[in-house]
Image (spheres, grey):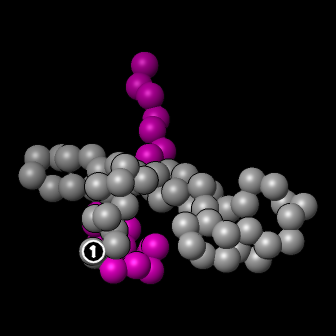
Amino acid sequence: MTQSYNLKILSVPEAIAQLRIGRTMFYKLVKDKKIRLIKIGSRSFILKREIDNFISSLMPSVLSEEHRTIHGLEVV
């Protein structure tokens, strides 16, 4: 029996482009353990769900509040 996995992996440049951030900010997020890398040989990749989870973590947890500040950014 074979299992089917639907895991999307992104290269570092693809993840940076998807997040629309710079390389320095990307590696700061990795260092701060906001995004985890996986290694395949000598290359680094990111699971798409890591990007999705990171973006979700930036969203306000209480939707009834009109304004929230997260990481110094105002989310409206």
Quadrant including the C terminus: bottom right
Can residue 27 be seen by looking at this rendering?
yes
Label 1, residues with CA under 10 Å away: few <14, some 14-19, many ≥20: few
Left or right of 34 in this view: 61: right
Quadrant including the N terminus: top left
Q: Please give the residue where the numbered disc 1 appears in the rendered image.
A: 24
Which residue is depicted at the point 67% across and 69% down?
A: 69
Spot occupied by residue 65 in the image (x, y as percentages of width and height): 86, 64
Which element carries disc 1, helix, strand or loop?
Answer: helix
Please name the amino acid that badge 1 sits on.
Thr
Which residue is depicted at the point 37% across and 49% down?
A: 33
Quadrant of the rendered image containing residue 17: bottom left
Question: In the picture shown, does residue 28 fall above or below 53?
Answer: below
- Is residue 18 within the magenta segment? yes
Which residue is depicted at the point 67% across and 77% down?
A: 74
Question: In the picture shown, does residue 72 fall above or below 44?
Answer: below
Spot occupied by residue 56 in the image (x, y as percentages of width and height): 62, 57
Which residue is depicted at the point 84% across and 60% down?
A: 63
Query: As rendered, which of 48 and 54 lies closer to the eye?
Result: 54
Spot occupied by residue 26 in the image (x, y as percentages of width and height): 33, 68
Residue at the far right in the pictured view: 64
Quadrant of the rendered image containing residue 52: bottom right
Residue at the far top in the pictured view: 1
Query: As rendered, which of 71 and 47 lies closer to the eye?
Result: 71
Range shown magenta: 1-22
Query: As rendered, which of 5 and 23 lies closer to the eye?
Result: 23
Left or right of 27 in this view: 4: right
Question: In the picture shown, does residue 8 fall above or below 75?
Answer: above
